[in-house]
Image (tube, helix red, strand yellow):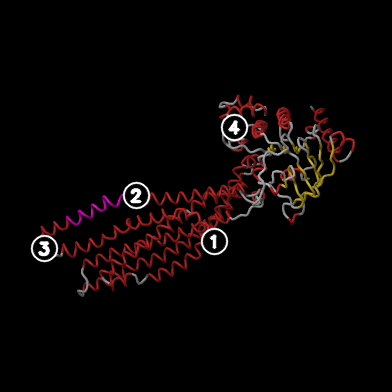
Amino acid sequence: MSSIKQYMKFVKPYMGQIIWTIVIGIFKFAIPLFIPLILKFVIDDIIQGDMTEAAKTSKLLWMMGIAFGVFLILRPPIEYLRQYLAQLVSSKILFDIRDKAFDHIQRLSLKYYSNSKTGEIISRVIHDVEQTKNFVVTGLMNVWLDLVTIVIAVIIMLTMDVKLTIVSIILFPLYGFSVKYFYAKLRDLTRQRSQALAEVQGHLHERVQGISVTRSFALEEYEQEQFGKRNKHFLDKAIEHTDWNAKTFAVTNTITDLAPLLVITFAGYQVIHGNLTIGTMVAFTGYMERVYSPLRRLINSSTVLTQSIASIDRVFEFMNETYDIDDKKNAVQLGRVEGNIQFKNVHFSYDEKDGDVLKNIDLHVKKGETIALVGMSGGGKSTLISLIPRFYDVTKGSITVDGHDLRNVTQRSLRNNIGMVLQDNILFSESIAMNIRMGNPEATDEEVIEAAKKANAHDFIMSLPNQYDTLVGERGVKLSGGQQQRVAIARVFLKNPPILIFDEATSALDLESEHMIQEALSKLSEERTTFVVAHRLATITHADRIVVIEHGKITEVGTHEELLRKRGSYYDLYQVQDFHNEAAVVNE
């Protein structure tokens, strides 16, 4: 389906309002069309009429009085209604598209986001969607109004003089050919310019987020050069677009400028030879402006529409991205689960060409059991736990919760049963209370405070200037790493899920913060099925079972004591970490 057809689905609910806006617009544009007729009447029937000066004056005042009444009383409310309705309808359509786009954003898989720049996505949802507004206002409203204005003006001109009317519109075919020729290429150039702008925005968004890296490595000059390359690419595309657009205007405006000259030449000849009145000649000259002004607007409209259509293409190119993870039509709606999870011969690969990241994973986790996943970086620990909330689907095998294959249940009902605390938890740039309430948006203030207390976060929150109303800044930048983690743990307490996932939740913290967070995590894990990915092995010795993952495979499973006695990979890892810990104590 073409992007225009898809866009029109959003327009369809408002077609009645659009038609009403066009009808009002016809009255708005039709009223000024009578001015040349009034001018003709004043010249031919009043000024050159066979009447006394008093009669001429009286007739002139009566006619102009009526005209002033129409323009002062009738036209202003029509103008207001037309402008208001046009902006109202287009704004509603854009609201619907952005609403749908945000829903789409939330349903796209993590795989898509790992291959896309955030800034480019934002550019499509904000900038490109805004550009499509012109398609509604210009393409669905103004173009039709300009065409109707031209038709009405030509009909009036035909009633005055057929030959002169033909001369007036003789250049129309040439105008139509030039528009078709120039605007075919302009659409492609507009699309290229929009893509180049999105690349600039994507690069800028990424670099603003990583400004601390730029500063710490003194990369300002290098980054300026990198930004300059992308900015220059956009400049080149913008200049190429501008060059072609300027050629378009030069040719089409020349055509619309030649037409009045033809009319003046032919009409002057007719007046000289007594075949046309001066009033008719003046009126026709006035109508040339009424005919060719809409044509010039149509040129501008063509440029605007070309830009809008290019933006529509980009918007629906994004909106048509397929979901790697989607609910089946008959997907089961899970209630609160017990927490029995089984991995059966699980294989997983991010890309078929890259081979399997996980291989032959078989693991049965019972309700309330704490499972620690350990191993060298890159072994597949974080990948394995990302399969549990179905951020990705297994390539082969299956994962079941209480006997339900994850692929046969709805994503939302599954994730309602899972709470996650990560190494780099995302906090939104709002209040601490709001960030905790992400665990349960309907929670009361008392429940939020209770969750914070359980997470060992209440005391530090109360020491802040605005306490629970303190704004944490983008990604929680105003809080320390330990404070961010405790807020993240508090929202999981508030959610109260039966399954927990801790992914390196304490690896980047100082010892004091780690102790407080470990205490909170221990309380949180009670009677819940818990998965812990840990770098510091000393923090997971209490686990019911420790699973060693190496090169995407499970190589050892057992308790801390069992694995130490086995003297395998876990023993080696533990000995290395224990040696480093002893060395650190000696150095102190």
| Kind of element beneath mark 2 | helix
Tell me which numbered mark, 4 or 1, is placed earlier along the sequence: 1
| Kind of element beneath mark 4 | loop
Task: Categorize mark 1 by other alpha carbons within 10 Å: few (<14), some (14-19), many (20+).
Answer: few
Identity, as a three-letter code, of the amino acid under mark 1: Ser
Which quadrant of the structure image shows residue 64?
bottom left
The correct choice, above or below, for 162 with respect to 87 in the image is: below
Label 1 near label 4: C-beta < 8 Å? no
Identity, as a three-letter code, of the amino acid under mark 4: Ala
Q: Quadrant of the N terminus?
A: bottom right
Q: Is residue 527 left or right of residue 48?
A: right
Q: How far apart are marks 4 and 1 (CA)?
A: 45 Å
Residue pointed to by mark 1: 2
Q: Residue 443 carries which label?
A: 4
5 and 496: which one is in front?
496
Residue stretch rendered in magenta on the structure: 61-82
Q: How far apart are marks 1 and 2 (CA)?
A: 35 Å
Tell me which numbered mark, 3 or 2, is placed earlier along the sequence: 3
Residue pointed to by mark 3: 51
Q: Residue 38 carries which label?
A: none
Q: In this view, does 549 lie to the left or right of 53?
A: right
Closest to the camera, between mark 3 and mark 2, is: 2
Tell me which numbered mark, 4 or 2, is placed earlier along the sequence: 2
275 and 30: which one is in front?
30
Residue pointed to by mark 2: 80
Which residue is drawn at the image coordinates 54% and 61% (left, top)? 2
Identity, as a three-letter code, of the amino acid under mark 3: Met
Closest to the camera, between mark 4 and mark 1, is: 4
